[in-house]
Image (cartoon, helix red, strand yellow):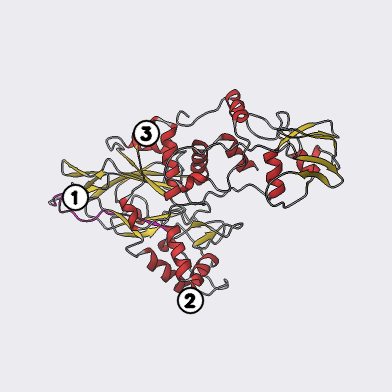
Amino acid sequence: MKSFRTLKPALLKRELLAASRGSFPRSFALCATTTTQRPKVNVRHYSSQNTAAIESDGLKVEISGGARKRESLPYFWLRDNCRCASCINQDTRQRNFDTFAIPSNIKPLNVSSTAEGVSVKWSDDHQSLYDWDFIQHYVEGDKRDRSVTHGLHYWGAEIAEQQPTVSFKDVMDSEKGVAELTAKIQNYGFSFIDSTPSSDPDLTRQVLERIAFIRLTHYGGFYDFIPDLAMADTAYTNIALPAHTDNTYFTDPSGLQAFHLLSHTPPPGVFAETAQGGASLLVDGFNAARILKKEDPKAFEILSKVRLPWHASGNAGITITPDRLYPVLELDEDSGELHRVRWNNDDRGVVPFGERYGPDEWYGAARKWDEILRRKESEFWVQLAPGRVLGMFAIRRRRGTWDTNIILKVFDNWRVMHGRSAFEGIRRICGAYINRDDWISRWRNTNFDRKKVLDSVIG
C-alpha cells in the first residue's frame, strides 16, 4: 500500500551491498533518544592477522576482539548459514535450499582469510563467504540481541512538561515523520500527533495506517463511537476508568492503541464551559513496575509469578480468553527484564490457588501495585477543557461543542496504561488497535539501516 515503503529487488541489493558490516548494537541505540537522527554506520576494520583454519570439530578462528565464548564454529552450522545469493533469496530473505539435504558430515575442502571475511569451499562443492562481523559475533556471543526495551525513557507526571509530539503533516508526508513518531512511541511509550483534523475521521484512520495495518477484533477495525453501550464494555460509557491496559483477554494484546477525541457535546442546558469531566489519563506501567520492584521486591515477584485468568464475556456469543493464564507483569525469558504489563482489574478472573503464592499474597501485592498507579506523581492527566492550552495543544470551542481536533494520542498498550475521568455529555471518539509486531517492524525499518535490521532479526 502507498503508506509503506516497498524495496525493489535491485534497490534492496544495492542497500545490502552498501550497508555497514558492523554488528547490530547490543540495544537499539535510538530508543534512548528523542530524535529521529539515524545512527551512524560503524565500519569495523579487521586486522590482517585474523585467520581461520580447518580443525576436526569446526572452523578454528583467530580474531582480535573481546572475550571469546568458543574457539571454533561448527561446520554444519556454518554451511546452513551461508548468505550467498544462491542460498538466500535476495528479495524475500528466505532460504533457497533444504537444510537437511546437506550431508551431516559436511567439511571444508579449502579455507582462506581475506579482508572481507572467511571464504570456504565445501565438500558439497558450494562456495561461501562469511564476513568478519558474523564470525566475530558468534565467536564472542551466542545470538543477536533482539530486545527493544533497552534505554527507555521512564516517566511520571513530569512528562506533562515535555510531551512527545509529532505533527500530522510530517507523519503523512514522509518516512522521516513516521520514523520520528515510532521512535517516540518506542522511547516514551506514547506520542501525540498534533493538528490531526476532526472534520473527517477517515483522516485519523489514514495517519494510523502510516504506522501499520489496523487490527480487527470483536469491536471491529477502525472504531468511531459515542458512550451508548453499543458494545458491552465500560469504554462505551461515561464513567471514570482507572489506569489499565486493553486486551488483557487476548493471547497477543494489541501493541498500539490510539484515541482521537473528535468532539464533546455537553448535556442539554449545560454550557460547554461548565460541563464536567473528560480528562484523559496515561501511566507508564514500566516505570510503576520499577518503583514496585524497588519498594517491595516480593510484591514484584508475586505479580510476575502468579498467573491469572482474563476474559471478555460481555457481548452475546463472545467469550474470549488467552491461550493460558498470564501474570500482571510478564518478564523476558532470557533477560528477566519486564516485557509486558497486562492489567485491567475489571477483566480479571478468579485469583487461583495452587500457584507459587496464594491468593492472600497476590491481593497484598496487587494492592501495592494499585497504590503506585494511583499516585499523583505516576499520573499524567490531559484535561480536555474549552479554551485551555495544554502544553502545545489548544482546545477550542465551536458551536456549543469542544473542538479537540488537534489531539490524537497513540500509545504502547504493552507498557502504557490509560484511563479517564467521568464526564458529562456526549464524547465522540475514533481510533484503532495496531499489532505489536507490525509497529515494531515499522519502527525498525524507518529508523535503522537495512542490514542492521536483518542481522538483528535473522541472526
Image coordinates for residue 194, horizontal then vertical, percent: 31, 40
Image coordinates for residue 432, horizontal then vertical, percent: 40, 44
Q: Do the residues labelled 2 and 1 touch (CB within 8 Å)?
A: no
Left or right: residue 75 versus residue 454 is right
Q: Do the residues labelled 1 and 3 touch (CB within 8 Å)?
A: no
* Pointer 2 or 1: first along the chain: 1
Image coordinates for residue 114, horizontal then vertical, percent: 75, 33
Residue nearest the observer in this picture, 61 or 8: 61
Element marked by disc 3:
helix
Element marked by disc 1:
loop
Q: Which residue lies under the disc numbered 1?
A: 266
User: What is the spatial separation of the Cα atoms under label 1 and label 3, in whole angstroms?
Assistant: 33 Å
Residue nearest the observer in this picture, 457 or 313: 457
For residue 374, which quarter of the picture?
Answer: bottom left
* Pointer 2 or 3: first along the chain: 3
Q: Which residue lies under the disc numbered 2?
A: 360
Indicate whether residue 282 is drawn in magenta.
yes
Image coordinates for residue 273, horizontal then vertical, percent: 15, 50
Q: Which residues are drawn in magenta?
A: 270-284
Element marked by disc 2:
helix
Left or right: residue 6 versus residue 205 is right
Q: Which residue lies under the disc numbered 3?
A: 170
Q: What residue type is disc 2 on?
A: Asp
Residue at left 55%, top 48%? 27
Q: Residue furthest bottom?
A: 360
User: What is the spatial separation of the Cα atoms under label 2 and label 1, in whole angstroms?
Assistant: 44 Å
